[in-house]
């Protein structure tokens, strides 16, 4: 692996009144002259019971520029 720049930004804002569980797994791998930016934002307002599981994997190799943005807003 050589010459890689990776930036990952994640923001999560959650307001919960009763029971809320959030599990998120994110894996980003970059190899060999790649610029990757991944931004994810999740805003959730939950009053009763809510569970959110998100898995995101982004892999980029060999002279590639990739930008992935994901936003999820849930009100339950």
Image: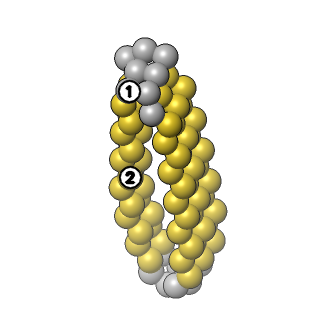
Q: Residue at x 36, y 47 (%)?
A: 57
- Neighbours of disc 2 within 10 Å: few (<14), some (14-19), many (20+): few
Q: Secondary structure at mark 1?
A: loop
What's the residue at 48%, 72% (across, down)?
Answer: 20
For the point 38% across and 36% down, which residue is it?
60
57 sits left or right of 46 in the view: left
Q: Which label is found at residue 40?
A: none
Kindly indicate the quadrant of the structure image that contains residue 14: bottom right
| Residues packed near mark 1 inside 10 Å, few (<14), some (14 to 19) or many (20 plus) | some
Depth check, mark 1 against mark 2: the one in front is: 1
Return the x and y of residue 16 as percentages of the image width and height.
58, 74
Which image quadrant for residue 31?
Answer: top left
Which quadrant of the rendered structure holds the N terminus? top left
* Outermost residue to the top: 2
Circles 1 and 2, Cβ within 8 Å, touching? The answer is: no
Helix, strand or loop at label 2? It is strand
Residue 29: x and y in percent read 38, 33
Residue 56: which disc? 2
- The CA distance from mark 1 to mark 2 is 20 Å
Left or right of 18 in this view: 1: left
Look at 43% across and 27% down and name the residue there.
Answer: 63
Residue 61 locus on image (x, y percent): 36, 31
Q: Between 15 and 31, which is closer to the camera in this rendering?
A: 31
Work out whether residue 68 can be spotted.
yes
Looking at the picture, how far across and down is residue 49, in whole percent? 45, 80
**Which residue is the site of mark 1?**
62
27 left or right of 38? left
Pick whichever of labels 1 and 2 is earlier in the sequence. Answer: 2
């Amino acid at each position: 692996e050589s010459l890689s720049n990776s930036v990952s930004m994640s923001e999560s804002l959650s307001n919960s009144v009763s029971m809320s569980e959030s599990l998120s797994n994110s894996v980003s791998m970059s190899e060999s002259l790649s610029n990757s930016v991944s931004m994810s934002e999740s805003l959730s307002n939950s009053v009763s019971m809510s569970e959110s599981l998100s898995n995101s994997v982004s892999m980029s190799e060999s002279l590639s520029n990739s930008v992935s943005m994901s936003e999820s807003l849930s009100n339950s």
